[in-house]
Amino acid sequence: MTESADLVLVGARVHTLDPGRPHATSLAIRDGRILAVGDRAEVLELCGATTEIIDGDGLVVVPGLVDAHCHPLWGARAMRDADLTEATDLAAACRMLAEVAARSSDEWICAHGLQREWFADAPQGSMLAEVVGDRPIFVSFRDGHGALASPEALVRAGISGPRTFGDASQIVCDRNGRPTGELREPSAMEAVRTHIPPLSAHRRLSLYRVQLDRMARLGLTGAHVMDDAPGDLDDLMTLERDADLAVRLVIAIWLQPEMDDAQIADAFCRAGRAGRRWSSGAVKFFLDGVIDQGTAWLHLPDLKGDGRHANWPDLDRYREVVGRAIAHGLGCATHAIGDRAIHEALSAYEDAGSATAHRPCRIEHVELCDPRDLGQFQRAGVIASLQPIHIAAVADDPDHVWSDRLDRTRAQFGWPHADLLRAGATVSLGSDWPVAIQDPRVGMAWARQHWAPGTTGPGYRDHQVVSAYEALVGYTRSAARAVGDYARGSIAPGMCADLTVFGADPLTSSPDEVPDLPVVMTIVDGSATYRASHV
Ligand SMILES: [Zn+2]
């Protein structure tokens, strides 16, 4: 007699995303894999004495949702005391800070998620002192490009005036040369951050666990981590010693322009590490910055004359390292937002043989793409990795496109989601959390409609919206393909049992309804990482 299933789910609606059998009502799982997909009778045959049977009436099963671009470990550390991305305005953020200050015995308060739009005038660190008194406070902006430090935090960091940095960083000072508390770009932020007492390993790991559990509750079975800090991989190893990760992670190892050959070789070595539910196999490049700050690399300068420079000052070096990574069997992910950056990344990938590479090459964000380059994604086998929630930044005010840096004609080429699909590209979807909110249901809503769920348009560039099915594929099958994973992303016998179970159908729910879809179960390797209390 054959072995019986560990778990069966019967009488549900199963969207398999498997062209061979797109729809079914029931499935069976054994040893972390899909044993069978079919109708109730076929699956019940596989039940034994120990099989758990779940009545799927009213449930909808899809392949496990994957956030194809996020920063869960950095995010966990940045918002160790408060997640201000949950706040809707400055007053709400201040209330959250006051609450954590009241209950935290730590001297420093660290939070993340301020929005620049919340400040009518230049942000002042003294505002933080009004909220929590004389304690040192460090709060980063949601875009990750700046932070606000309280006067006491500046004192602890020994900052009393302007400083010169090797990058575009700035300690913002008033007319009298006194720092206001605003810190722009990484080096200025580091000048304060290095004075914050480090988290204990225990606290750090528990913050990671909290975030991974939160992601499982959102229905996420996997995430692609687009950064790495020293010690991250060791931390994941330690976490897995205690228990399985709630979310499967693929980590891209960050390569920086100033790294020499020995450092690149060391990074390639780290990219070879893996645990049970985490692996790397990929490296990450930042080829440019963002349009709003004038740091995106554009074919033609923006309206303020910016956008002329790459983040890798020596393009040949970037191309050489891409070639080496591909020859090493690694996938490459390049942050490229401006049309020139996207063009050069595509060209570097293609010349290095991306079309036949061992692991996929991908471009992160693809915000402003020259229409002539769209077909290149498919030809060079390059994944387009988009974060539809970023459209929220421009959708509220279509006249205020990317801080007025782009003329209307060029702004028309933003977020070419539908055009990329029409050009045959594989488009994976993600959130960029903690830069934007993470909920994949909200991400699917923004992919399907370019204005905030629950409001009315007109929104931004409606002709680039995609269907409910295409949005789901972006968060499942295409996200799996973006890291060369062919064992997940659809539901068929032999595939890994990473599944998301909803209480309603994402394919028939409207974009306004999708953010409220109940997540009933999240299943990784055949085991529930989240289960609503009624199941
Ligand atoms: Zn990112």
Image (tube, helix red, strand yellow):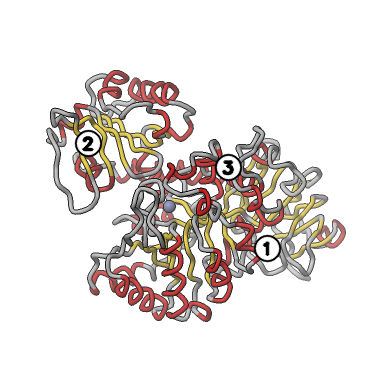
Q: Nearer the viewer, mark 1 or mark 2?
A: 2
Image quadrant in which the N terminus is located: bottom right
The answer to which of marks 1 and 3 sits earlier in the sequence is 3
- What amino acid is found at the position of numbered circle 3 in the picture? Arg
Residue 445 location, quadrant: top right
Q: Is residue 238 visible in this depiction of the protein?
A: no
Of pointers 1 and 2, the one earlier in the residue sequence:
2
Q: Is residue 97 above or below residue 231?
A: above
Q: Give the distance between the C-alpha atoms of the residues marked 1 and 3, in whole angstroms.
A: 20 Å
- Using the image as rendered, state which of residue 457 and residue 19 is in the foreground: 457
Point out the image quarter for the C terminus: top right
Alpha-carbon span between mark 1 and mark 2: 50 Å
Q: Would residue 135 be found to the left or right of residue 252 on screen? A: left
Instruction: Indicate the secondary structure of the residue bearing disc 2.
Output: strand
Measured as percent of width and height from the top left, residue 109 is found at: 30, 30
**What residue did someone put label 1 on?**
490
- Mark 1, mark 3: which one is toward the viewer? 1
Q: Position of residue 415 (x, y in %)?
A: 55, 54
Proximity of marks 1 and 3: CB atoms separated by less than 8 Å? no
Q: Secondary structure at mark 3?
A: helix
**In the rendered image, which residue does mark 2 sit on?**
172
Query: Which amino acid, mark 2?
Result: Val
Q: Along the horizontal axis of the image, is 176 left or right of 188?
A: left
The amino acid at mark 1 is Ser
Classify residue 420 as left or right of residue 432.
right
Residue 22 lies, in percent from the top left, at: 78, 62
Return the residue at label 3: 217
**In terms of depth relative to the viewer, which is nearer, 202 or 66?**
66
